[in-house]
């Protein structure tokens, strides 16, 4: 077992390569997950209270042993955790065959007081932990509903409030956002999106689809009834309604032909033609997870359940922007973390 996250420090990848890797991870972790609704509480994940961790090893970081590009993604998250947790952090790599009971015993021996579980594999390894040991989850799109009531989980799904704010900044004339989603995956996210839309003066039109055929029909109807001057379509992280091989090509083609703005929660969609997307800032995500863990150590009441990602980068497609009548100056383009097509 490594005793410090310093072993994970690496030279940063180029922006585009890191972005692609992050989105590959998103696709890998979404399979088989059930989304949970947020639970009430008083403090949000990511609030930065400058409190010192209690003791060496009091924060246990459980992370999956995977090859590239996943290793570098988790390495960056762990680096962010280490920035805030310092000597209080101890890392525990886990594999698919890791015995959760043995992990629980090891954490107790080493004096762990709170666990940060990364990725679906890391979260699964914490299934046998003592109930009094708090868990902060990260690097996943969602956690099972029963588990979400007892932990704080920061999703890899960008906060709709941030997405809608950027949309209004780029296209202030937008009045309506259309989204097709599977409620089994994203009911919690759509509830947040409704609140965020109202705050931005937007109408959210959310269509439920539980299979690919239903999603295709709903997109067809949505485009037929859309108005290019006031409507935009949002692509969430949803394996059912944003299928990469069938749904995405259809939606990209229709949005281009009808001049309808298309924005996404996936970086790779911008490369393929979406106007813009938000995607994880893995270093800052790690820092947010560390602050949440420290809050548990200091006795602060935390909000439990799924929390959307607020540590984000932004990508834009300038070709699509031009097609929609937007002229982004060089100075404006510099405010984005990734620009496509690449120069």
Image (cartoon, rainbow, N blue to C red):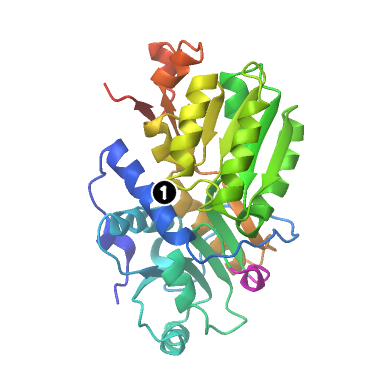
Residue at 25% across, 57% down: 68
Task: Identify whether 222 is placed above or below 139.
Answer: above
Kindly indicate the quadrant of the structure image that contains residue 155: bottom right
Seen from this angle, which residue lies furthest left?
11
Q: In the image, residue 199 lies at what x, y percent? A: 75, 32
In the rendered structure, does residue 219 fall within the stretch colored magenta? no
Write down the residue under mark 1. 282
- Residue 253 appears anywhere in the view: yes
Mark 1 element type: helix
Looking at the image, residue 15 sits to the left or right of residue 221; the answer is: left
Q: In the image, residue 4 lies at what x, y percent? A: 32, 67
Residue at 32% across, 72% down: 3
Q: Which residues are magenta?
A: 144-150
Between 325 and 80, the one lying in front of the other is 325
Pointer 1 local density, CA inside 10 Å: few below 14, some 14–19, many at least 20: many
In the rendered structure, does residue 147 fall within the stretch colored magenta? yes
Residue at 47% across, 75% down: 124
Q: Which quarter shows the N terminus?
A: bottom left
Looking at the image, residue 54 sits to the left or right of residue 343; the answer is: right
Q: In the image, residue 136 lies at what x, y percent? A: 55, 65
Kindly indicate the quadrant of the structure image that contains residue 69: bottom left
Task: Identify whether 171 is placed above or below 163.
Answer: above
Residue at 39% across, 39% down: 268
Between 64 and 134, the one lying in front of the other is 64
């Amino acid at each position: 077992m490594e005793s410090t996250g310093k072993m994970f420090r690496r030279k940063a990848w180029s922006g585009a390569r890191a972005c692609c890797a992050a989105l590959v991870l998103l696709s890998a972790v979404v399979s088989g997950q059930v989304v949970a609704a947020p639970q009430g509480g008083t403090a949000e994940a990511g609030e930065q209270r400058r409190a010192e961790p209690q003791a060496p090893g009091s924060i246990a970081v459980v992370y999956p042993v995977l090859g590239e590009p996943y290793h570098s993604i988790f390495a960056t998250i762990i680096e962010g955790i280490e920035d805030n947790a310092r000597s209080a952090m101890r890392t525990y790599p886990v594999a698919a065959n890791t015995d959760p009971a043995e992990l629980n015993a090891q954490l107790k021996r080493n004096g762990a007081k709170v666990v940060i579980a990364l990725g679906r594999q890391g979260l699964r390894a914490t299934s046998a932990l003592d109930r009094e040991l708090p868990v902060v989850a990260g690097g996943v799109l969602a956690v099972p509903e029963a588990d979400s009531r007892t932990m704080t989980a920061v999703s890899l799904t960008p906060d709709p409030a941030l997405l809608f704010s950027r949309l209004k900044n780029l296209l202030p004339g937008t009045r309506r956002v259309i989204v097709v989603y599977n409620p089994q995956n994203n009911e919690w996210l759509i509830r947040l999106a409704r609140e965020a839309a109202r705050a931005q003066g937007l109408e959210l039109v959310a269509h439920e689809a539980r299979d690919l055929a239903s999603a295709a029909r709903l997109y067809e109807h949505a485009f037929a009834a859309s108005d290019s001057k006031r409507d935009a379509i949002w692509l969430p992280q949803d394996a059912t309604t944003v299928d990469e091989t069938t749904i995405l090509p259809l939606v990209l083609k229709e949005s281009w032909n009808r001049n309808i703005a298309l924005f996404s929660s996936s970086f790779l969609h911008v490369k393929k033609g979406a106007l813009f997307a938000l995607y994880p800032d893995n270093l800052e995500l790690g820092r947010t997870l560390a602050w949440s863990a420290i809050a548990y150590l200091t006795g602060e009441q935390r909000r439990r359940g799924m929390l959307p990602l607020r540590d984000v980068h932004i990508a834009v497609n300038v070709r699509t922007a031009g097609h929609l009548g937007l002229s982004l100056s060089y100075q404006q383009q510099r405010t984005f973390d990734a620009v496509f097509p690449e120069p």
